[in-house]
Image (tube, rainbow, N blue to C red):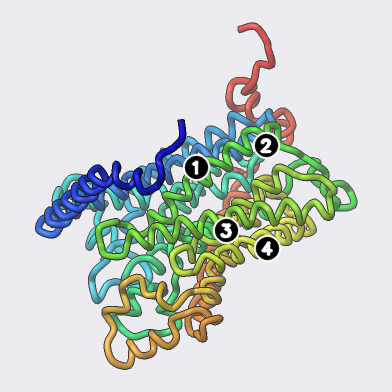
Amino acid sequence: AACPPPSLLRLLLHPFLTSLAMSAATFTSDMETAIGVNSTAVGNLDAFYLLVVGVFVFFMQAGFALLEAGSVRSKNTKNILLKNLLDACIGAIIWWVFGMGVAYGDSGADTGNVFIGSATTGAGAFLAAGWGSSASQYNGYTMALWFFQYVFAAAAATIVSGAVAERAQLTAYLIYTCVITGFIYPIVVHWVWCDNGFLSGAFTAKRSLTVLGGCLDFAGSGVVHMTGGVAALCAAAIIKPRIGRFDENGKPNAMPGHSSPFVVLGTFILWMGWYGFNPGSTLGITPEGYGTIMARAAMCTTLAAGAGGITCVFFDRIFSHTYDVAMVCNGILAGLVSITAGCAAVLPWAAFLIGIIGAFIYYGSHHLILKLKIDDPLDAFSVHGACGFWGVFAVGLFAYPEYTSMGWMAELTGADLTLAQAQYKGLFYGGGMLLAAQFVALIIEVAWVAGLASILFWSLRLGGILRVSEEMEMAGMDISKHGGAAYDHGKAQ
């Protein structure tokens, strides 16, 4: 049958569409009224939002598990999966006992410590609350915020396990996970994300705009990814390469992972989790404009990931003459890490360009690490460390003037406000101060993480608990430590 003419369709559908529009307007008005007069409802909505996006980020642990398991040889599958499981378990306890306090203690206090948070005072007082002495700490939003920050901490620790895969002792793993989750990482969080941190934009808003106070790392290219990546590089360099990874001339021998499907599925899961990681870093949904920030973060995240994956595989094709699946996966992850700092502060075209450049940075870093004869089975440093550095630096180049304040500029007055409006934007928009702030923050963060991680892993090595024996490494961790191979290869049960 022929379709009725458009004018007839409008006539037939007009009553329905009018009714639908009125219902939607009434519903929206009712919601705005309810939220406007009920602060508890606002807090509950923001808490629910944080829980949902936090679950997305938590599911990234499954992505890391599949990616890492697929990237190692089958004889070490159980070992790497166990470490991913323990990351989630240990991270939860450490972050509850004192990690959250170190990161966010004294938050909101004008005279709080600029270097480290207190585990027993302020918004991060989870040591006291956790042992039952202050039940008032357990409101819905605070607990949701703790959960969201915990899954970030677990992600940072997981990055390191890939760099020392197939040869690190479980004892060493347990020690370095506790130190990174409980001290190295939350200190960086306090500097950049707590409003009292000396690298925080919020710290700047409360006092005066300085180079040290103007860092913008929205979702953690530096705080999370570069921290994990730099620690991973130190670990891989100190533990030394796997047996047979390089020949007598120093040229790398191929040691491919055992499952490309695991690698691809893990990459897709991580990409999905990034939609909690980046948009969720608004830490709420009810304040005016947060929905727009969230949507912009999601769009920029998508563009950078797509651009990174395409760039990496086709650039590698020039030299390898193959379309390497692993290069697509690592290019996607490189784009995602690169855009994490600026996902809410740049325009979509800039996100696309940041992803492309991130792919080149990953590719160059990957080959440089091999030249240095450092064995990083998961390319943890190249993906997270090098691209994390680029992501923070890129904000200083591409940050769009109207997107950089994230609300705190409203606290400034007089000369501080004038200076912020003139300088707190990307270099390509006439700024310069923000780029300086980003660079200074990067140098400080790298020095902190590299220094402490080097001490940590050298101590483990000198103590004889960093690396397994040669016999155990050759046999594989699964047989020597975990009761047998991960796969039965068709054997009868």
Mark closest to the chain's N terminus, 3 or 1: 1
Mark closest to the chain's N terminus, 2 or 1: 2
State how far apart marks 4 and 1 are (Cα): 31 Å
Q: Answer whether labels 4 and 2 touch (C-beta < 8 Å).
A: no
Name the kind of residue labelled 4 in the image: Ile
Mark closest to the chain's N terminus, 4 or 1: 1
Mark closest to the chain's N terminus, 4 or 3: 3
Q: Answer whether labels 2 and 1 touch (C-beta < 8 Å).
A: no
Q: Which residue is mark 1?
A: 174
Mark closest to the chain's N terminus, 2 or 3: 2
Q: Going by the picture, which residue comes out furthest to the bottom? A: 415
Location of residue 439 in the rendering, given as x and y in whole percent from the top left corner: 54, 76
State how far apart marks 2 and 1 are (Cα): 20 Å
State how far apart marks 4 and 2 are (Cα): 23 Å
Location of residue 370 in the rendering, given as x and y in whole percent from the top left corner: 77, 55
Question: Do we see residue 340 in this rendering?
Answer: yes
* Helix, strand or loop status at disc 3: helix
Location of residue 96 in the rendering, given as x and y in whole percent from the top left corner: 32, 47
* Helix, strand or loop status at disc 4: helix
Direction from residue 183 to residue 147 in the image, left or right: left
State how far apart marks 2 and 3 are (Cα): 27 Å
Q: Which residue is mark 3?
A: 304
Name the kind of residue labelled 3 in the image: Ala
Name the kind of residue labelled 1 in the image: Leu
